[in-house]
Structure formats: structure tokens, C-alpha cells
Amino acid sequence: MNLSKPLRAASRFLHSMLLQCRVHLPRQQCFAFVPPTNAQQSGIGQIYVINLDRQPDRLADVLRELNCILDAAGKSLTDRVIRYSASDAQNTTHDELDCGDIDPFYTLGDQLYVEPQPQALPEEFDLVRPIQMSQAEVAIARSHIGVWRAVAQSTSPYALVLEDDVWFERGFARVFDHAWREMKDSDRTDPAFDLLYVSYAEARHGAPKELMSEHVFRPERGLWFLSGYVLSRKGAQALLRLLPCRGPIDLWINHQFSAIDVRALRRPMVNQRVDLLSTNSYSVLPALTKIGILDYSDASLFQRRPTHYPVFAFGAPGTGLSSLAMALSMLGYRCCSDLDRLPECEFERLTAGRAQPMFDAYVNVASLRPHLRTLIRRYPQAKFIVTESKETVDRGGDSLFEALEGADVIRLKGKDAYTWRTLCEHLRVPPPAAPYPVVQEIGQLIHRGDVVDISLPRLAKRLRHDRSPWIAVSHSGWEGIRASLSEPPRPSALRVRFEDDLADVRPTRWLLRNDTFSGNLGLFRPANVLAHSDGGLSLAVRREPLGVRNLSAAAISSRDSFLYGRFEATLQATKASGLVTGFFLYRASPRQEIDVEITGNRPSRLLVNVFYNPGSEGVKFDYGYRGTPAAIPLGFDASKAPHRYAIEWDPCEIRWLVDGELVHRRAIWQPTPIPHLPMALHVNTWPTRSRGLAGRLSLRALPASAIVRSIAVDASSAETSALCHS
């Protein structure tokens, strides 16, 4: 697991240039590498390089490194390289990555075995809670297992296995030959190991080990990376017998150290390049963050921006247009979709070219279809897409193609309508490491016009927002897209309604949290949630040594998730500076969130916020740092008495109410799309790291508490399908 931060651009360039310049230095000679055809000598024969088909430049860099080293016969190590085509998570579906060799679920306990954390105090539930490997982790494991099969069937007794992001230290040949001779002497024959690490990183507190010689040790556990190692034929056969791999490959293999003969060089002589950005996605990071081990934030910002735009997509109903819109959003397009007509200001920007349009992709917008020739003339570089049904010939599609004559256009039909390859080749962008989204078709929403029909009593102040493809750039006069469903939603049989005075915390309804998150100076502890003398619950923040944190905090969350509805809490916020009282809806993978927050340094102000990431269930799009916050004056001190705070969330709008009065509302793209996936309900009080959010933490004011009198919910349960996004 490589958590090293990538270098800045200048440092990356310098590191890359230094590696390239090394070709002018004298070559090393390593006598442990013997000619593959020489049966009289026992040593390392083949070198396997695991390399993605779409990254030939990385293979060239590894070959350059190997060309600086000669074997026992004086020939370059490049002569014995066998390229192994790596499994590619970006071009493979999740089902295709599933195989009997890999069990994609592991636990936090598995992780802590390899890297113990003496300061952490995880609950038993945390230790056994399943964690699902990311698609990238599954693909990496699958690639290594494929190489093991090749080594097990080869005639060479040893093989060097490399990933394609490594470089060799100048002293590699000398150190490796010393280690090889030491092992031959101690084993009194050819080295008897199963696996020899030449590239690794020790766990933070060191790897327990037994020193075997000056240059070799035997690890008990605690070695990360599997980017460079020598594997014997018998070792490959042993590893294959130990399958399935449970968890990331470098974690799982630590659990096999007692079953196989594993050794490592006293210091790694093959290193991972720091000028390359890792494409791996580490599934364990959220779990480590929750128990306070790692102040890792998955709240980074999405950096990818498309270079080919605008994109226009049309098609018949039921041909995957809503899924296409979601896919374009995941590729980094700011995509407006599923509308009968654009807002007038955006239509003028787009067709008249008087100003920069708000969006760079438009999918299933009916008002644009009569203007195809205008769009082609105004945007000769535009990409057009036509979706069609696979069952029938779409006559409308044929007429659409006639209107698009001369444009850069593709047809998405049948399986092409739900895969990345055709779409990404057309747009000339790499696919994300996530399955192609399949979402329910929305049809076309009815745009209600640009006039806001209700004047809000309090003016919201927009605070600093994240920069993201899914946050509309502020334009004068832009009020989002006020729309409604073309047909009213059918009443759900899975409607959940309750009003809970919290006199008794029902364990089937509420979870008392025992985790944390990056940015929280405290650990949530169930003991901090107490019955209040006047009714409801007290959520306390206290000074308390807990190993990874010196403060404890309090949070409850619903066990169920909800999709659209009304959520209300009657609560009294804390007034301690540095503390936040929150009432919000939240989900991860992808991250979506609707917030009500009151900060202890300014309890007369309400903070509302929305985080949006695209994708369908399970997609690891968890970007966002600030979100899209706005501050609303309350007109009272929220720490003095209980007040009612409500969130009303429907497919096309979010509304915030205080004591029954509407104080803020957001339409589609004002400035985000409306969250479209089920979310759990949360109430908490916690100490923030950010002084900008809640002021400097006042330790003298602790313990401090927020009081939650009641929570009311009238919402659709998570089993109800998503109805709308745009």
C-alpha cells in the first residue's frame, strides 16, 4: 500500500530526468542472473514485467532500467524480459474481475495484523466488518496470480517479477550477488526460498524479522508492496495452493509468511518511482480513517477535465440516455440532461455564442434537436452521440443521422450503449476505474421557467466552493434549472414515517457511532450519547485520551437509508468555539450529502451544504472538500433554546426550513445536481480541525453538549429506485 504523496511537477520532471541520465553510467553486472539456456548454472532466468496494454511508455522505462544491468554472461537483462499483460480494471467489468482465485472481501483485522496500530482502539465490530477490494486491487492481484502460474509451469528455477513503475538502485548488482551467495552458503545448495523481496516498504512501526545474514532477513509480517520480488518455481506452486487471495495481494501474502519460506534483502534495492501517479484505489483507507488511525482524507478534488467538447447526445426513450449522461459526468463533463428545454439564458449562450455556456455536455435536451445544423456550424469540433434500441431499427435515429451529416458522430446501440470503450474512444478520454453506470431512465423533465416563485425571507451568503465538474460556475443571473417530473411519482409502498422523541434509543432504528473521520479531532463514542433530563438526547464532546485522539465526541445515525423525503430535527446547538452541531444526510461511494450545520463560534448562523458525486451504487467517487456551502442568518442564537430544522429533498429540488419557515432552496445545478442515491440520516456534535469552519477550539469550554429533542422522518426507503438526476 503506497500512501506517499506524489511529487510536484518540477520535482517529478527532475526525478524522471535523473533516471534517464543514468543510462550513461557504467553498467552493473549481476552474476545471480544466468543465461536461460545454461542448464549447468542455477540462478534467475526469466524476468516478468507486469504492464498494462495502454501504458507502453512504462514498459519502455523498465526496459531502460534493466538495460543498465548485465547478466553473468555479460548480456543485458532486457534480453530475458517477458511482458505480462496486466489485468486492466478500467476496461474490465466487475463480474469479469471476479474469479475463484480471489475472495474480494477482507477485514480491518487482516490489515492490522500486517501493520499493528498500538494507539488505535477499534471495536470488535470494526475488526470483523467486511471491506470490499477495489476493482484496481482485484486487477493487480489477478495479474500477479497470472505470473505465478507462468513461473510454476516454467523450466527456470527462479524468476524476477516486476511491476512497471520501478527503478533499480546503483548498488543493486553488488548487494544482490552478496545476498545470493549468503543464501547458497546457509542453505548448502541453491537458495531454498519461495519468495525473496527486493522491493518493499516496512510497516510504520517496523516489520518483525529474523536476521539470516548480513544482507538477508526473514520477515514475520509487515512488508508492503509487491512491486519487485524473486519467485522460485516451488514458491509459485506453493502460493497457488494457498489461494484464494483474500484482500489486496500485498496484504494477503503477509498472512502466508508462516506457510512459505519468505526472505527479504536487508534494504530494498528496487524502488517504486515517485514521479508516476498511482492508479491504485486503496479500499482500506476509509476504514482506517473511521477509527482514527489515518488522517487520510478521501475528500480530494476531481482533477480530470475533458479536452473534447461540447458533447450533444440524442436518442429515443429507453435507449440509455440517462445512463449516458451519468457516464459523461463520471468522465468529468458538466452535463445537462433529460430536459424538455434549456433555461433561456443557457440556450442563448449556446446557440448565439454570446458568452461561454454553462455546460460542456447536453444529453436528451428536446429544445436543442431542431437546432442541430446551428450547433454543427457553431461548434465544428463538437462530439455528437446517437443512442438507439438494440431490438428495433430506429427510424428516428436514421433521420437524426441525416441531420448530423458532416458532424463527428457515433451510434451507441446494444452493448455499446453500456460500455466505456466506444464512448471513450469517441471522446478520446481514458475510462474511469469504475463500471459503466446503469441508471433508471428519467425521460425529460419539464422546465418551469427562470423565475423564482417564492421570495426567501433570509438572504444566503455563498461561501467558498470546491471547483468541480459537478459544481456550476457562478454566472450573473444563473438560478439553476427549476424543473418538475413529467409525471408525478407513484406513491411508494415503502414509505417510512416516524416521529421519535428519543426517550428510548431503538437499536433497530439508530446506531450510536464509534468511529471518526478526517477533519474530526475527536472519536465518536457511544458513551457520549446520554438521555437528557428534559427529554431527548445529549451529544457531548469531552477531553479524553483515546490513543489516536484526545477528545471524544457523539453521533447517531439511522440504520436505514432513504431516498427523497422530509427530515426534521428539533435540537439545541452547542456554543463552544471549535465545535460543530450537524444534522444531515450522507452516503459514500459515491459521496453525496445534504447538510445542516451550526458552528459553536457563530450559533446565530445556519450553514447549508450539498456534496455531489456522479455514479451508481458502489462507485468510488468520493470527491469534495468544502462542497457548496452557504451561510444563512437565523435571527436567533441556536444555542439558547431548541428549534426545528428540516430538510425537504425531492428529485428536482432541496429545501431547508427553520421552525417551519423556508430559508433556502436549491434547484438542479444550483450549483450542483440533486443527489440521486439513498442516504442515511445523521446527527452529531464534533470538534473540527478547521478554524475557518468553527473557530479555534476552546478546550476550557469542554465538556460541551448539543441537545436533540426529537427526529421526524417522512421518506421513501432505500429500496425505492432513483427517479431523477440531471
Image: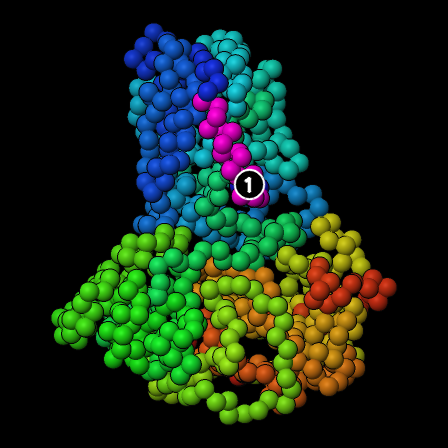
Q: Nearer the viewer, residue 611 or 76?
A: 76
**Residue under the image location 32 percent in, 57 percent down:** 427
**Residue under the image location 46 percent in, 20 percent down:** 24
**Residue under the image location 50 percent in, 63 percent down:** 468
Circle count = 1
Residue under label 1, please give it: 10
Q: Is residue 11 magenta?
A: yes
Left or right: where 465 falls relative to 363: right
Identity of the residue furthest to the front in this view: 354
Q: Position of residue 124 (x, y in %)?
A: 62, 53
Q: Is residue 381 above or below residue 534?
A: above
Our reading of the magenta stretch's main secondary structure is helix
Find residue 687 and report its image quarter: bottom right
Q: Determine if residue 710 is in view.
A: no
Q: Nearer the viewer, residue 217 or 368?
A: 368
Q: Determine if residue 390 is in view.
A: yes
Q: Is residue 562 above or below residue 214?
A: below
Find residue 340 and report its image quarter: bottom left
Q: Amino acid at mark 1?
A: Ala
Left or right: where 150 falls relative to 631: left
Q: What is the span of residues highlighted in magenta in the rendered image?
A: 5-23
Q: Is residue 50 magenta?
A: no
Q: Nearer the viewer, residue 537 or 726?
A: 726
Q: Nearer the viewer, residue 581 or 546?
A: 581
**Residue under the image location 19 percent in, 65 percent down:** 406
Q: Position of residue 572 (x, y in %)?
A: 73, 79
Q: Position of residue 226 (x, y in %)?
A: 48, 34
Find residue 116 and report its image quarter: top right
